[in-house]
Image: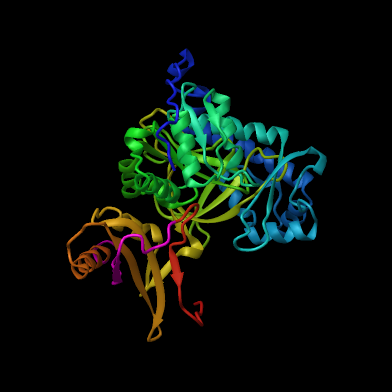
Amino acid sequence: MSTAHAPVLAPKAPSLASERRYWAPEIETRSRAEWDAQSLRLLQAHLRYAYGNAPYYRARFDAARVHPDDVRSLDDLRRFPLLDKGVLRARQQAVPLLGDLAAVPEDEVVYVSASSGSTGVPTLSPFTAGDFDDWIDFEARLFWASGLRPSDRYAHSLNFSLFVGGPCVLGAQKLGALSIHAGTVPSDRLLAILRQFQATAMWTTPSYAWYLGETAAKEGIDPRRDLAVRRIFVAGEPGGSIPETRARIEALWGARVYDYYGLSDIFGACAGMCEERQGLHWAEDHILVEVLDPLTGEPVAEGERGELVLTTLRKRARPLIRFRVGDIVSFTSEPCACGRTSKRLLGVHGRVDDMLIIRGVNIFPSDIEAIVRKDHDFTGEYRLVVERVDHLDALSVEVEHRAGLNTPPEALAARLRGQIKAVTGVGARVVVLAPDSLPRATHKAKRIDDRRTGVWTA
């Protein structure tokens, strides 16, 4: 790819609106008591709405002998049954097109996103016009908190094909940024777009931000010098909240990385980092959060890891009541140094189905990622291989040494093995490979190669 003669545009001029600190100060700075009071009011009304308009919820609540009028506090929500992806899929197939969790007729639905279908039939997520407007306004709020301004040129590098992340670009447009609907074009084309428009911000996955930076270097482009990107929003993988991964991406780009979190079943980004980058500010006026022990179903202490369970508070097309997301997360309700007071997602540590139990110790790919990417003798790419040896699960960690390194692979492996043991308590075999030996991801990286057969569950 040649970008040597691409025109270089002058920066956009800042506007007076750029001086505003908050997108919606009356919402973003309210007290904890005000947040909780609003959540309770919205929850009570939303449960009544779901019960009265969605056939599934009426039948399910009646079977569980619970009623919306029973809710007098936020803790009372725990009496209501949980919901998971399997139910969404089954009800959609039983009552096409949208399933009987839908609470509006199809003629009120203006947009649908869909899950990837990686674990089964893709499930649709419907939106009324009001739902869609609420979503885009929250995206604008997140972008503003992350420092995006009307003077920016923003390249949206996410899939637009039914993916819920696609329309998030409209949040950037709403706040006034010049918005480039790049989509998932080949890397050489995206680099040309970034160069031509002198884009100052973009959004992609952590793996692809890494891959694109490496690709640029191989093409003779220094992202820090030849491109204008100074903010990179990432989502879709835990890496954006892992400081070591953020630091490596930032070193490639000379840009600040901001982690975002969303899911197709509710709306695009439900949380995102402000400029303090001490957790992700949650859409607390739209979604109620529970963090539960995945085995007992009991709430975990604030800051502790547990499974994310979400309840919509405003979505009319398809309410979700106590939806088990499958992500292992931690939260805090402490106010942020930026002045915003909503709950903050401290990180997505993995998925329930990605958790490995090695000799009785729970391990997530993100635990290994933080260790590997802190050591700059490695490229940062890694893969976990799980095998059954003598009736016990054994973990191997495959990594690549950086180009030009003269340290013997055996010494690198011994050092990394010691670091993994010290941090996680797990003894792992470490395999050090040559650069570019492991596959690169252009969307979400697959980090686990499970080679076990005949695996039983306890």
Seen in the picture, residue 309 relative to 39 is either above or below; the reply is below
For image coordinates 22% across by 57% down, the residue present is: 404
Q: Residue furthest bottom?
A: 390
Q: Tell me how the rendering is colored.
A: rainbow
Pick whichever, 270 or 402, lies toward us.
402
Q: Was residue 422 drawn as part of the magenta stretch in this picture?
A: yes
Residue 62 % position (x, y): 75, 56
Front one among 70 and 403: 403
Q: Is residue 337 above or below residue 323?
A: above
Task: Count the numbered circles shown.
Answer: 0
Inspect this view and state whether residue 347 appears: no
Query: In the displayed image of the protein, which residue is found farthest to the top?
Result: 16
Most foreground residue, 214 or 124: 214
Region of the chain picked out in magenta, as a range: 421-440
Q: In the rendering, at what x and y percent does residue 11 appear?
A: 42, 21
Reply above or below: 393 against 152.
Answer: below
Question: Which x, y percent locates residue 296?
Answer: 51, 63
Q: Quadrant of the N terminus?
A: top left
Looking at the image, residue 217 lies above or below residue 33: below
Q: Is residue 171 visible?
A: yes
Location of residue 353 in the rendering, given as x and y in whole percent from the top left corner: 51, 64
Residue 426 shown left or right of residue 29 in the figure:
left
Q: Check if residue 108 falls in the magenta segment.
A: no
For the point 54% across and 41% down, the residue is 270
Residue at left offset 55%, top offset 45% = 184
| Relative side of 248 to 159, left or right | left
Left or right, 61 with reference to 27: right
